[in-house]
Structures are given as structure tokens and as C-alpha cells.
Amino acid sequence: MLVFALVHTRDWSAIVRRRVGANSDIMAEEVIGRLQVLAPAGLAAFLLSLGLIALLRPWLARHALARPNARSSHRQPTPQGGGIAVVTATLIVAWTTIALSPALAQNQFGQFLTVTAAAVLLAGVGAIDDMRSMPMAARLTVQCIAVGAVVVSLPEALRILPQLPSWIERAGLFLGGVWFVNLANFMDGIDWMTVAELVPVTAAIILLGVCGAIGILPALAAAALFGAIVGFAPFNKPVAQIFLGDVGSLPIGLLLGWLLLQLMERGYLAAAIILPLYYLADATVTLAYRVGRADPFWRAHRIHFYQRATDNGFTVPAIIGRVFLLNVALGALALISIAAASSTVSLAVFVAGMVIVTCLLRMFARRKR
């Protein structure tokens, strides 16, 4: 009730009007209207995620305990599976908001329903894998089914690169989706890493939603995911009381990929690549390195750049702080590329993003002096 009172206050309305301009009352009303949807959604997801983790943690400690091994970054047995609260809070809040205001779904109801079903499927497989290890082939098969369903649900008119034949583009989206699902899983290897990634990325998407640069439904999903991951953060801060687990990382990767696809659909290709650029660079370079060495790349390891940083003398807070600040900078660059609406500017900020990401990777790869 408090958040609804806040978003309906006349003082907030007056502030927005003053900042947008006296002759832009319609625009101000649209901004306020979107805030009235997104702010309560974020707060509700935060509270629900926080409460669910507090309730589930004792059960997870008995049934989904991650014991340290040679490839782990933790030293004490720690419950995993906290992602079930993040995903549950995100989807419940998003769908409750849609049920209260069906117009929010616009023409994406069926697509978001498919995304939800795919996320639930991945969460189920992840939950099983958190409690007892599943064969790689079975996990990959389910991931392909989930991502394939989402790709099939996309409207036929959606084209990211019209220069390519449609079937090639859809095949690329499928492969990229499967990679993104695994990407989030690979990168969730130390405390607060996923928090440091998701908070800046979803915040940028929420801001775009408030400004009307993307649709209200993806902005709603981003707000719910933002709130849910912030609710998870207190339990995952170094040293973590609970881990996200595959039950969280796999569906979060799918949801994040779908949100970035919404940017691509609006023509913001550069922004959609810049926002997750650190995740993409760290995981992709590491995978290429392991394939080049003929390593069994599907097995657990400790050679991601952020993992090497812990071996090179960086503390976990120092690593996470640098990753968070980098992602904030990438978010700013992505917003600049959208605001400029120029291919030249987009290329320039993309190059800038690559430079700062490369600098951080090189820093992590070297022993701290």
C-alpha cells in the first residue's frame, strides 16, 4: 500500500512535470503511468523473493547442499537453490500485474506465456540438478526445447538483421538463446556475481521502459526481476548464506536473453550487445580457450577470468565491485547508443565498451601487485 501511495502522490507528479517541461504534460503523464506499474512490481518482487528465501533456506540446507570441491569458490557447505525464490517472485509478480491490467500484455501475451513456461521448465531441470546431478545430454536437450519454444513463439515479422534469410536468423537466435541460458549458469560462480550483472542491466531496461523506448511488458518483467534479485542479494553477499543454483541461473539466463531480444526488436542491437558485454566476453573467451586446448568444456572448472582473479589475489568484494562498476558503465554506454540514434555513435560506444571490458579481463588475468 505504501508504494501505491508513493506513485500516486501529486508532489512526484509535479516533479516529473517540471523536469520534462511545462509543455509536455502528456509525456509526463505517460512516465508517471509507467512508474505506477513498474515501481510496485519491483517492490512486490523484492518482498516476495526476500520472504521466500527466508522460508526455503532451512529446507534447501537439508536437500540441496553444495559441498566445496577443488573447483569451488566457497569453503563451507552452503545451500543452493535460492534462485527458485527469484524466479517465482519474478513470474508471480509479472503475471499478477498482467491479470490486474491485461492491456499491459498488449500483443505479447502468448509470447510471454511461452517464455514463462520455458523458464519454469528450466527451473525444474535446474532444481533436479541442484539436488542430484543430471547427465549433460539431458540438460542440453531440455534447454534446446525451452529455447526452441521461445523462438517459435516470436512473431514472424520480427527481424533483427533483415539482410539475412529468416531461417538463418532464427537459427542464430536459437543458438544464441541456448548459449545465454548456459552463460548465466557459467558466470554464477562467486557470491554476488549475478547480482552485479542483473541489477545494472535490468535497471537500464526499466529506465528505457519508463521513457517509452521499449514496451511496458518487457519493462515490467525487468522490474520484477530487478526486485527479485535485490531480495536475493542480502543472502548471497560475501560470504554467501545461499547460492542461486541452476534452478535460478538457467531461467534467469532465458529471461535476460528475452529482455535483450526486445531491445533488438526495437532496433537497439548495439545496446543489446553492450549491456551483457562482460558476461559475453568472459564466458565466450573462456569457452574458446578450453575448446582450443581440447578440454572437456562441459565440465566444471576454475579458469573464468573472475575465478582466476580470486587465485591472483583479488578478494571477492573487490572483484564484484569492479564488475558492478563496469556494468554500470556499460549500461550508460548502451543508453547513449539508443539516445544518439546514430550508427556511428553506436559503433563508437561499442568499441569503448570492448576496451573497458578487455581492460578488466586483463586485470583479472594478472596477479595482483
Image (cartoon, helix red, strand yellow):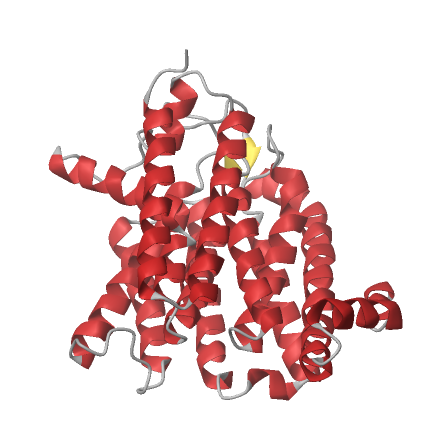
Q: Residue at x 24, y 54 (%)?
A: 137
Mark yes or no: residue 71 visible: no
* In front of the other: 120 or 351: 351
Find residue 105 and report its horizontal and vertical position in percent: 56, 83
Q: Considering the image in quadrants, where does the C terminus appear?
A: top left
46 over 318 or under it: above or below: below
87 left or right, relative to 35: left
Q: Residue at x 77, y 69 (%)?
A: 18
From the viewer's perspective, tell me whether residue 286 is left or right of residue 97. Answer: left
Q: Position of residue 271 (x, y in %)?
A: 40, 60
Residue at 22% of width from left, 67% of height from top? 172
In this picture, is 48 found above or below 369?
Answer: below
Query: What is the quadrant of residue 156 in the picture?
Result: bottom left
Q: Between residue 162 and residue 130, name the one nearer to us.
A: 162
Q: Pinpoint residue 230: horizontal percent, then vertical percent.
A: 64, 49
Q: Is residue 227 left or right of residue 199?
A: right
Nearer the observer, 53 or 173: 173
Image quadrant occupied by the N terminus: bottom right
Residue 346: where, in percent of width, then height?
Answer: 35, 59
Q: Quadrant of residue 58?
A: top right
Residue situated furthest top in the rendering: 369
Q: Quadrant of residue 359?
A: top left
Residue 285 can be seen, yes or no: yes
Count of residue discs:
0
